[in-house]
Image (tube, helix red, strand yellow):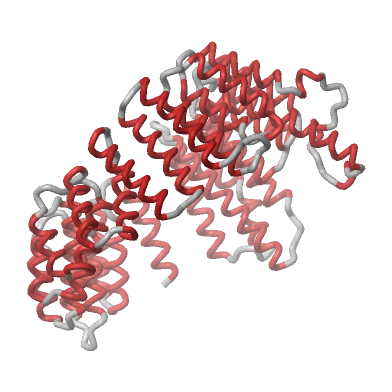
Amino acid sequence: MGEYVQQTLEEMTNEVQQLEHAGLFDHSEVKKIVSRRKLFEYKLRRRVKDKQDYLMYVKYETKLLELIWLRRKTKGYNDKKVEIEGAILQRINKLFRLACRNWPQASELWESRIHFVKKVEKNRTQVSSLYTRALQVITNVPSLWLSAAKFELEVISSVESARHILLKGISFNKNSAVLWHELFRLELLYVHQIKRRNVLKKEGLLKKVSLPRYAHNDSVSKEVLQGKVAQTVFKHAMIENPGSVNLAAGFIHIVKLFKWATDLETEMFDFMFESFPEQPQLYELKCTRLIQAFEAKAPGCGTLPTLQKQCDVLLKQMMAVERSEQTWDVFLNINYRLLQLSPCPTTTQKFLLLLAFVERFGSLSEFWMILWVKIYQYYADGDLTLELFSKGVQLFPQSEDLWCNYLLYLADKKGCEAARNLFINTRKVRKDTLRVWEVVLSLSANAYTDIQSAALYEIGVGECEESLAAILKEKYLDWMYLLRDINKTRALYKRLRRTVGLREQFFKQYIDIENSQCEVDSEKIRAAHVHLTQEFGTKSVDVWLDAMAWEQAQGDLSRVSVLFSQAKKSLPDNLIGEFLRQSTTNSGTN
C-alpha cells in the first residue's frame, strides 16, 4: 500500500513545486499540504473503504483551491494555472468518479459532485450530464429529481426539459407530494411568464424587462393559457393518490400565488368538497379564502358582518360533520382571524367566551390555552388571570410556556416567594426543563436569599434528570463564584466533580475561574485538567490538547510528553489520527 501512496505523491511533485516557486505557499506550508494528502491517500487505500474519506479529501482540496485563488488575487500572480489549479481539479474529479463508482446509490455523493461542478467549473453541459447519470441509478430520491428540474428551468431556461424530468420522477415516485406540487407549480409559472410577456408587449416595455427564454413563445394555445395543463396535473395527482387531502391542500396553497388562476382555484375547491366532504381542513381553506378576499378588497366580497356570517355557516357545517380536536382548532383559528380584522373589546370578549365554551364542551389545545391566558393578562384582573393560569397548568402540566409565564406573572403580582413556593410544590406534577429552571433562578438572583438560592440549586443538581442536572451544576458553580467566595466555589467543585453526568464545560468553567484569580494556583488548574482527562479522555481529543497547551505554557515540557503518551493510550483508534494531526499542527505553530 505504501508504494502506491508514494507513487501518487510523486505525481504531485510538479504541482507542489509550482506552488512554492510561485510564492503562493512557503516551504513549511507545502510540507503540510503533502502531509495531509499523504494521510488522505492512505485512508483511500484501506481494505474497508468509507465514502466520508472521499468527501473529506474533496473538501480539503476544494478549500485549498479557494485559498490559492485568494492568494493569487492578493499577489497579482496569474501564471501556471494549468499546472496548479488544473491538477487539483483533475484530482477532485477523479475522487468523485471513484466515489460514485464505489457507491452509485449514495445520493449525497452525486449531489456533492454536482454542487462542485456548479460552483467551481460552472459547466452547464457537464451539470446536465451528471444529473442524467445520477438519475439513471437513483430513482427513489425526489429531491434529486427536483434539483435537476430546477436547474433545467432556472439555468438552462428549458421548460420542456424540466417538465420531462418531473414527469419521469413522478413515474418512479407516484406518491411524492413534492414532485406533484412542483410539476403543478411549473405549469402555472410557465403560463404566468407568457401572460406577463404579453402584457409587457402590449405596453411596449418588453425590451426593458428581462424574461426567461421559455416565455418567448407565441404559439401557446388558449387552453394552456387558461391553466388546463395545470388542472390536468391536479386531477392525475388525485387519481394516483385518492383520499390524500394534504396533497390536495398543497395544490390550493400553490394556485393562490397566481392571481389570474382564480377560476382554476374555484374548480379545485369544488372538486375537493365533492371528494372530501368531511375534512375540516377544507372548511378552513374555504374560510381562509373568504378572509383573504376581504383583506384584498376583492370585488363582491361584501362587508365584515357578511364575511362573519359566511364563515359561521361553514363552521357550523363542519361541526355538524365531526367534533374533534382538529375541528375545534379550525373553529377557533377562523374566529381568531375574524377577531384580528376588527379588534375591539366587544369582539375580544366574544372570542374569550368561545375559548371558554371550547374548554368546557370541546377540546382545547395547548396553543389556544396559552393565547387565552395572554389575552386575559390585558383584559382581566390579576386574580382571574392567576385562576386561568392554574387551570391551564392543570390541563397541560407538561407545557413549558405555560409554567414559565405563570411563574413570571405570579412573581409580578404576588411576589417572588409565591413563585418559588409554587415551583417547589408542583415539581411532581410538571416536567423539569432548563427554561423553567432559568426563570426560577433568574427570580432567585433578584429576590431570594443566598440560602434559598443554594437550596434551589441543591434540588436541581440532586433530583433532576442527568442531562438537566449537568447544566444546573455548571450554573451552580458559576453562581457560587459570583458570590466572590473562592473557597466555597472550590469546595462545591470538589463535591460536584464526584457526581455522575458531568459535561466538559463544568471542568473548563472551573479552570477559567482558577485562571481568573489574582494569585493563580497552578496545582489546582493541573488537577482540574487531570479530572477532565479522566472523565473525557477516551472520547475527546480537545481535553488532551488543552491540557498539553496549558503545560507547555507553564514551561513543563516533560509533563507535555507524559500527557501525549497518556492520550495515545486512552483515545480510541478512530481519534488517534486526529489527535496526532492536531498535536503536530499545534506544536509546529508554537
Q: Quadrant of the C terminus?
A: bottom left
Toward the top, the furthest residue is: 239
Q: Quadrant of the N terminus?
A: top left
Q: Is residue 570 visible?
A: no
Q: Residue at x 64, y 62 (%)?
A: 20
On the picture, is 9 further left or further right than 399?
right
On the picture, is 473 further left or further right than 347?
left
Q: Nearer the viewer, residue 220 or 280?
A: 280
Q: Residue 139 at what x, y percent from top left?
A: 54, 20
Toward the bottom, the furthest residue is: 518
Q: Nearer the viewer, residue 242 or 453?
A: 242
* On screen, residue 130 above or below 28: above
Q: Residue 570 at what x, y percent from top left?
A: 21, 53
Residue 543 placement: quadrant? bottom left
Q: Residue 342 at what x, y percent from top left?
A: 49, 50
Residue 18 placement: quadrant? bottom right
Q: Residue 99 at what x, y percent from top left?
A: 52, 32
Q: Is residue 479 visible?
A: yes
On the picture, is 523 further left or further right than 281?
left
Q: Residue at x 47, y 43 (%)?
A: 338
Q: Nearer the viewer, residue 34 or 536?
A: 536
Toward the right, the furthest residue is: 204
Q: Nearer the viewer, residue 434 or 226?
A: 226
* On screen, residue 513 above or below 359: below
* On screen, residue 26 above or below 390: below
Number of numbered callouts drawn? 0
